[in-house]
Amino acid sequence: MKLYWFDTVNPRKACAVAKYLQSPVEYVRVDLARGEHRTPAYLALNPNGKVPTLVDGVRVLWESAAIMCHLAARCDSDLWPQDDRQIDVVRWLSWDLANFYRAGGTLYFEYLIKPRLRLGDADPAAVTQATADWHRLAAILNTHLHDRRWLVGNSITVADFAVAAFLPYAERARIPLDEFPAIRRWHDRLNELDAWREPFPVLAEAA
């Protein structure tokens, strides 16, 4: 298998799961700053021109949620449960993509990606709206987690890897966490995992 990645938030999910599962993947770095995601060869794999992309034999997958689920299913991992919990995992993946990811993603883009790619200063209006949205959505998540260790059931799933994706960048992206203790405790548990703290192969080798 080949996993095409760059050190941004969506590839982080796939790389973290791959490392957690010790999946037999060959990591291929796609340098977004150099436009490698727009080359004909890469677009033939992923017509969206985004990362991550997974190639597993003749199967080519894009979208981080699908890749995480595939990696877990491939080794019969409970990260992608095969019982009633699966519906709840899908619920949290859907909620994240439709809501939580958008708020965190805006702050991540404005404060981290724009400076990195020299796209100008943060947009105050976008930051204000995203911060308000994040507060509202984080309150929902915090309430859900107040008496739970993980999002679904009693063990970690791909939903945890997905929904928490922006938390490692919270300080730099100015994502407010102080008023959400259950979210902070949940992220502390994730930080106990080597695969979560250092998901990218280059960063892991440099550690």
Image (cartoon, rainbow, N blue to C red):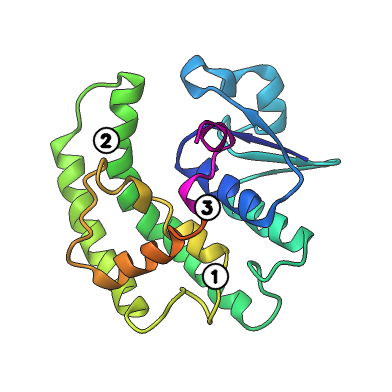
Secondary structure of residue under mark 3? helix
| Foreground disc of the pair 2, 3 | 3
Q: Name the residue: 57% across, 68% down.
A: 157
Q: Main secondary structure of the magenta part?
A: helix
Mark 2: amino acid: Glu
Mark 1: amino acid: Ile
Mark 3: amino acid: Asp
Quadrant location of residue 106?
A: top left
Q: Name the residue: 33% across, 69% down.
A: 185
The range drawn in magenta is 194-207
Q: Residue furthest right?
A: 58
Q: Is residue 108 above or below residue 188?
A: above
Q: Is residue 99 above or below residue 19?
A: below
Q: Residue furthest front?
A: 207
Residue under pointer 3:
194
Instruction: Using the numbered discs, state the Cα–Cα distance from disc 1 to disc 3 in whole angstroms.
Output: 14 Å
- Mark 1 and mark 2 lie on one chain; the one further toward the N terminus is 2
In the displayed structure, does residue 125 sit left or right of residue 185? left
Residue under pointer 1:
156
Residue under pointer 2:
110
Residue 186 falls within the magenta-colored stretch: no
